[in-house]
Image (tube, coloured by chain):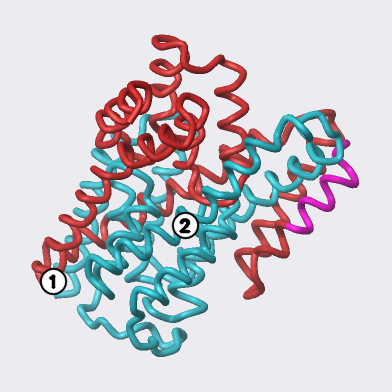
Amino acid sequence: MSKNAAPPPEEPPLNPSPGPGQLFMAFAKAGLMGFGGAQIWVRRAMVEERRWMTERDYAEVLGLGQVLPGPNVGNAAVMIGRRFAGLRGSFAATGGLYLFPLIVLISLVLLWQGFADNPDVSAFMHGLACAAAGMVIGNAFRMSGRLRPPPELIAIGLLSTLAAAWFRVPLPVIVLVLGPVSIGAVVWRMRRAG
Amino acid sequence: MTPAAWDLFVFFLKLSLLAVGGANAAVPEMHREVVELRGWMTDATFSQGYALASAAPGPNVLFVAVIGWHVAGAQGLVASLLGFLGPTFILAWAVASLTQRLAGDWRLAALRAGLVPVAIGLILATGLVTGAAAARGSGVEVAVAVTITLASALFTWRSNLSPLWALAAGGALGWLLLH
């Protein structure tokens, strides 16, 4: 693994760092779109649409956000906001992420009694839930395809999937067991590369 | 602040730093406290609120806001969210400062790179678990549901178009075929 921070050749160059206003807008859009979890949409905004971060950089921030308590995407918002625009950036990103979905959700709660038993609505929501799950799966493949991890890291990733989805191992256990193994594998490859 | 809103604030404050893996990981504990111990919500309201929070756009952690809203209105909503998100905000902020101070240190680089496979593996697991939960109904409906999930996965993976198209198509197919 090279120490070179430059993005891989297929990634276009990064855009200038955003201010709090731009962060708020980007996270607000990601939050509002965020069916199946806002993480996918935050990644899309940061890495593909706005080009503020490289794929690897985003994945590493998300990895930290995952092991910290609280929502992974919420933690990522705090860290990304801080990096680009300090405390105001963290508040802007966090506020953007939660504000509009919160309004939508409370409206749904208030309206729910009106359409809870509507078969059209529940059939639509069922199809939407399937597509959202597929989106999360496809996103995992998209990220790993672009990161091109060595085989031992692919194996560790698949082990995490198996442990969580099949064996239902509690998340802290997965992080505490496979996290150090994975870090060890990274160190081993760094040493081998010199 | 009303006593109920204060109780919510304290409960979610205590739960916050235990919620490794996000709100979903803490849902069983919320259920125990809110439904079983305090009787603030019925089992049905709790499940319905959870289903709504999962189906609505945005982070699933907003389920916390639904609980607050049900128990103590707007004050409860604000109290619950502040209690749950406040400590994690401060911790994420502190960790971000630390990583910026240690930038260039090879041990930090190894830590950051090492957590990536686990994070992506867990994202994949989330998709598989929610996909399996959505594959329900009669035999034909299960086949339709799995097809929508796989097609959406393929589209998100291989296409540069917005995944919003996959969601819209999934909803439309559901409306046509999953009655």
Q: Which residues are magenta?
A: B168-179
Q: Position of residue A67 (x, y in %)?
A: 28, 46
Q: Which quadrant, please, contains the C terminus of chain B? A: top right
User: Which disc, if any, is residue A39?
Assistant: 2
Seen from the viewer's position, the closer of residues A43 and A19 is A19
Seen from the viewer's position, the closer of residues A144 and B57 is B57
- Residue A171: within the magenta? no
Which shade is chain A?
Answer: cyan
Residue B80: name its quadrant. top left
Whole-number angstrom distance, CA of label 1 to CA of label 2 = 24 Å
Main secondary structure of the magenta stretch: helix
In the rendered image of this protein, does residue A97 appear above or below residue B77? below
Q: Which residue position is annotated with label 1? A: B103
- Chain in red (letter): B
Q: Identify which residue is drawn at 47% across, 49% down.
A: B123
Q: Identify which residue is drawn at 56% across, 53% down.
A: A136
